[in-house]
């Protein structure tokens, strides 16, 4: 089964730099992108974790406006991808594991999203995906995005804290910086919190196979910036909303 989120913080392979932002193309995915996406999967995942061409094809065909990619404009290399589907809080709260979260079908009236998969070999490319999507999310009326995350630091932390618990680890934190911002102990949760995913919805045992997490998973929620004003944004052309992209990312 494919692990949903990165088993370690999003980072480039050693010695590989992300192209300058003006050379990173972000857009909705097409079936023609699948070969490049498979190459990204093979860089990021073990064979048993990687999505197949058929799985990607189904996702792109079913939710074309919820499948995103960031590409090197000069080479066509896929640097990051994200596949989402409509969901609801109730559906996710009733789901025991990642497979159920990814499989359940939402009602047409549900205006929340579940991230089936997020893969990135460069933090900048991952950021570019979110920056690209926020205006489209506002235009469509999406309010929240849920992600299922492993806890790649949990096993090592538990070795150092044998009396600890997964609850203590997930909800624990350390203060950083001059402002004393509290960031999660886990590097993956820390990465997501810095990108607006601040709410811990629940912790599940046997969520997906991941040794470093002791198979625990955490479902987290991020709020689309400024989405409370959805009726206004839905009336504006997407070109106007694109002007807000930089400001929206600052609000996270």
Image (tube, grey):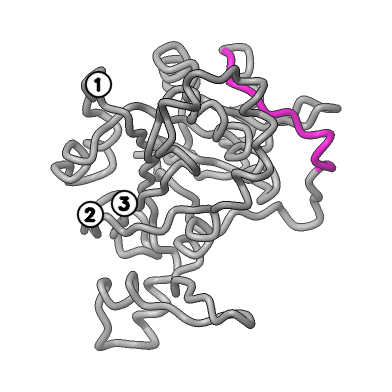
Q: Is residue 34 visible?
A: no
Residue found at x 31% / y 59%: 200
**Is any atom of residue 121 visible in this view?**
yes
- Percent of width and height locating residue 214: 31, 64
Specify whether 20 is left or right of 144.
right
N-term-proximal mark, 3 vs 2: 2
Q: Which residue is mark 1?
A: 109
Q: Position of residue 3 (x, y in %)?
A: 40, 45
The residue under the point 75% across, 57% down is: 14
Q: Are marks 3 and 1 in contact (CB under 8 Å)?
A: no
- From the viewer's perspective, tell me whether residue 191 is left or right of residue 170: right
In the rendered view, tell whether residue 93 sits above or below residue 210: above
Is there CB contact under 8 Å for labels 1 and 2? no
Q: Which residues are magenta?
A: 19-30
Q: CA distance from mark 3 to mark 2?
A: 13 Å
**x and y percent of residue 151 in the render?**
39, 63
Nearer the camera: disc 1 or disc 2:
1
Which residue is at the front of the view, 179 or 150? 179
| N-terminal label among 1 and 2 | 1
Q: Nearest the camera: 189 or 47?
A: 189
Upstream in sequence: badge 3 or badge 1: 1
Image quarter for residue 80?
Answer: top right
| Along the viewing direction, whichever of 239 and 53 lies nearer the viewer | 239
Q: Tell which residue pokes out farthest to the front in this image.
A: 232
Residue 209 relative to residue 229: left or right: left
From the image, tell me which residue sits under label 2. 206
Mark 3, secondary structure of its residue: strand
Q: Quadrant of the N terminus?
A: top left
Figure quadrant of residue 33: top right
Q: Secondary structure at mark 2?
A: loop
Looking at the image, which is closer to me, 28 or 135?
Answer: 135
166 to 158, vertically: above or below: above
């Amino acid at each position: 089964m494919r692990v949903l989120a990165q088993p370690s913080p999003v980072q480039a392979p050693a010695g590989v730099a992300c192209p300058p932002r003006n050379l990173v193309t972000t857009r909705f995915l097409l079936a023609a992108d699948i070969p490049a996406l498979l190459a990204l999967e093979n860089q990021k995942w073990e064979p048993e974790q990687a999505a197949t061409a058929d799985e990607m094809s189904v996702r792109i065909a079913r939710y074309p406006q919820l499948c995103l990619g960031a590409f090197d404009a000069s080479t066509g290399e896929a640097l990051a991808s994200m596949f989402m589907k409509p969901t609801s809080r109730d559906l996710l709260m009733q789901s025991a594991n990642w497979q159920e979260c990814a499989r359940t079908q939402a009602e047409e009236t549900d205006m929340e999203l579940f991230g089936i998969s997020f893969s990135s070999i460069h933090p900048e490319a991952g950021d570019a995906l979110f920056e690209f999507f926020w205006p489209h999310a506002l235009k469509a009326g999406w309010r929240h995005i849920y992600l299922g995350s492993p806890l790649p630091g949990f096993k090592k932390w538990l070795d150092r804290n044998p009396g600890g618990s997964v609850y203590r680890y997930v909800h624990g934190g350390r203060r950083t910086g001059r402002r004393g911002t509290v960031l999660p102990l886990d590097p993956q949760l820390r990465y997501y919190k810095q990108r607006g995913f601040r709410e811990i919805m629940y912790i599940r045992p046997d969520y997906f196979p991941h040794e470093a997490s002791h198979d625990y998973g955490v479902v987290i929620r991020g709020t689309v910036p400024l989405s409370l004003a959805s009726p206004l944004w839905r009336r504006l052309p997407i070109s106007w909303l694109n002007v807000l992209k930089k400001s929206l990312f600052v609000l996270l």
